[in-house]
Image (cartoon, grey):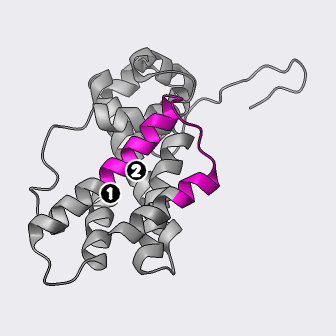
Amino acid sequence: MLDSNDNTVNIKPYHHGDLRDGLIEMGMKLLETRQSEGLGLREVAREVGVSATAVYRHFPDKEALLRAIAERGFAMMGELQVQASAGLSGPAAFAAVGAAYVRFALAYPAVFRLMFSSAPPRDLFALPLEELSGPMRLLRSHVAGLMPAAMPEAARKTAAITAWALVHGLAVLALDRMITLDDGMIEAVMNAQARGI
């Protein structure tokens, strides 16, 4: 809250609601200004207006908070992808899902990097579609919808990995300032990919 007298920011003490959720939201907000290595539990507690002890009731250590932030990031990305593809089908829906992936990465760069650096190592293509959620389920579902039903599973897997590599690589190249992306270029690349499947 901004104090109109001296233009300083006063943090309201946290008294109501879901403290765990508030800590995750504050962690995400703080990540807008730094990398995950620079985020501390005490700082998050201070910014939310609670004691450090209160934080430890929800997160035993910094890694637990970072994992929760990463999970929230995947959920947010998935929601944006669903919204972007609402009312669309076929290649247009596939392109919208990919564009939303890249736009999320550009809007939340530190959270995006955290999502992939803190995820447990596992082959997401070895899991059945029913066990997946969020962005990976959307990717595999859209790829399957664009390919003929008789297409072998190996071809579907190759197409999904190719599509993921494209959107993830595009996002990382933009975040690393190796390329400059605007909405028009994101759309053009995604539409070209969708036509190629």
Viewer can see residue 87:
yes
Q: How dense is the environment of label 1, judged by Cα within 10 Å: few (below 14), some, or many (20 and up)? A: many
Q: Which mark is residue 163?
A: 1
Q: What's the distance in space between the residues labelled 1 and 2, CA to CA?
A: 6 Å
Which residues are drawn in magenta?
164-188
Q: In the displayed image of the protein, which residue is found farthest to the bottom? A: 149
**Residue beneath disc 2:** 167
Q: Is residue 185 magenta?
A: yes
User: In front here: 131 or 91?
Assistant: 91
What residue type is disc 2 on?
Answer: Val
Q: Position of residue 51 (x, y in %)?
A: 46, 20
Q: Is residue 72 magenta?
A: no
Instruction: Name the residue rendered at 51%, 37% in the picture.
Output: 174
Q: Position of residue 190 (x, y in %)?
A: 47, 60
Q: Give the prevailing secondary structure in the magenta stretch.
A: helix
Against 178, residue 93 (above or below) is: below
User: In front here: 75 or 170?
Assistant: 170
Relative horizontal placement of residue 68, taking residue 151 as reference (left or right): right
Viewer can see residue 23:
no
